[in-house]
Image (cartoon, rainbow, N blue to C red):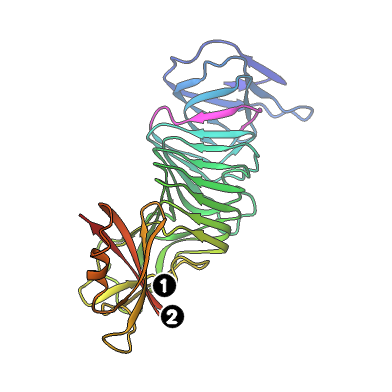
Amino acid sequence: MSAPYVRNYLCGNWSAFEGVVKATTKANSSYTPSFDFKNSYGLPKATLEVVAGTTVTSQSGSFKLGAVSGNGTLGGSNAWEIGYLNTTNSFSGTIASALTKVGTGTLLLSGANNYAGETNINGGILRVNNANNATVSATGTGRLNINNGGTLTGRGFIDNNIVYINSGGLFMPGAYYVGELKVDGSIYQNPGGVLEFRLNSATSHSSIKGLNVMTLKGTLRILLKEGYTPSLGDSFELWSCTSFSSSIPELVLPELPANLAWDTSELFTGRGKLSVTDANGLQLNSWDEMLDIQVVNINGLTVASLESKATEWEKDVKELNLAKGIYLIKLQSGKSSRIVKHYQP
C-alpha cells in the first residue's frame, strides 16, 4: 500500500488477514504522508513491513502485530505489541512510543530508539544488535521489564534508565557466547530472575559494561561453550558498574576438572570477576587455620555465622541442623575466599 496523502486512514478490520502489509509513501516536498489505523483490531496474523521514510501510527491504546520488518517508523503514542506470529524478524527502523514483545519468536532491533515509554518483554527473545559505539539506544530510554517467559539478549548499546529482571525472566548479554552489551543505566534482579553469562574461551566471553547500579537477588548462571575447558589462571570480567549490591544470589557454575576450582572472591563486586584457581581452594597457611564462615539461604539471608578449622567446616555446618534446602557457604581466610553450594537433606 502506498500513502499519497498527508493522512491515510485505515478503518477496516484486518485482524484476520494473513500475509504481508507493506507500507510505503510517495515522496512529497510539502508534507510527510503517514498510515493511520483508526481502530484497535491490529494485525496479529500479519507482518507489517514499514519502508524507509514511512510512518505508521495507531489511534488505539495498544496495537497488535504478528511481526514487523523494514526500517521505517512505528509512530504515535500507543504501545506496539509485536510477536504474535512466533517468528524471527528484524526491524532497523524507529519506535516512537513503547514496545511490548510477545509470543515465542525473536525480534531483532538495530535501529536508534529514544522513546521514553516502557519496553516489556513478555515472551520470546528481544535481541539487541546495534553498534557498541552507538549513542542512541536500541530499546529506548524508559524502564525495561524482562518478565516471565521473556529474554533480553544481544550486543551493542541500550540506554534504559533501569532494567528489571523479573521472576521467570532471563537476561543473557552477548550474541551466543561472545559480545559486550553496554547498559547506560541500572539493573535490578528480582528473586526468580536469571542473569546468564557464557564463556567461549580464555579471552572471549559475554559481558555487561557501563552500568550505574547493579543489584542481584535471583540466579546468576555461568555456561561454558561446548569444547572449552578452562585452565588454571583463566579469568573473566563479566560486568562493570559504579555501585554493586547483592544478597548473594543463587550461583550456578559449570563443572571444572578435578584439579581446578572457581574463585568467586571478586565476583560479587563492581567488576564481576570470576577466576579459575587450584582446587585446593583457599590459600591456607596451616591445616588447622581458622575460617570465618557465613551460611546464606536462597533468599539471600544470612542464617548462620561461625568459625571453624579448615579441616572441620563441613562437619560444623552439618551440625547446624539447617532446614532442608540449598545454601551458599562463604569461606573466608584473610583476603582469600571461596563460595560453595551446600544441600541440606
Question: Farthest residue toward the right?
Answer: 30
The residue at the point 29 percent across, 76 percent down is 231
Q: Residue at 22% of width from left, 70% of height from top?
A: 315
Query: Residue 257's image quarter?
Result: bottom left
Which image quarter holds the N terminus? Answer: top right
Q: Which image quarter is the C terminus in?
A: bottom left
Q: Single out the residue that lies furthest toward the bottom.
A: 285
Magenta segment = 73-86
Question: Which of marks 2 and 1 precedes in the sequence?
Answer: 1
Taking depth in this image into account, of 40 and 218 the one nearest to the observer is: 218
Q: Nearer the viewer, residue 174 or 231?
A: 231
The image's mark for residue 227 is none
Which three-letter amino acid code belongs to the residue tagged 2?
A: Lys
User: Looking at the picture, how far across and down is residue 14, in whole percent?
Assistant: 50, 14
**Up-down relation of residue 288 to residue 217 (above or below):** below
CA separation, marks 1 and 2?
A: 8 Å
Judge depth for marks 1 and 2 and give the one in front: 2
Q: Secondary structure at mark 2?
A: loop
Q: Is residue 313 above or below residue 32?
A: below
Identify the residue at image location x=55%, y=38%. Answer: 119
For disc 1, the marked residue is 265
Q: Which residue is mark 2?
A: 335
CB within 8 Å, label 1 to label 2: yes
Tell whether 162 sits left or right of 236: right
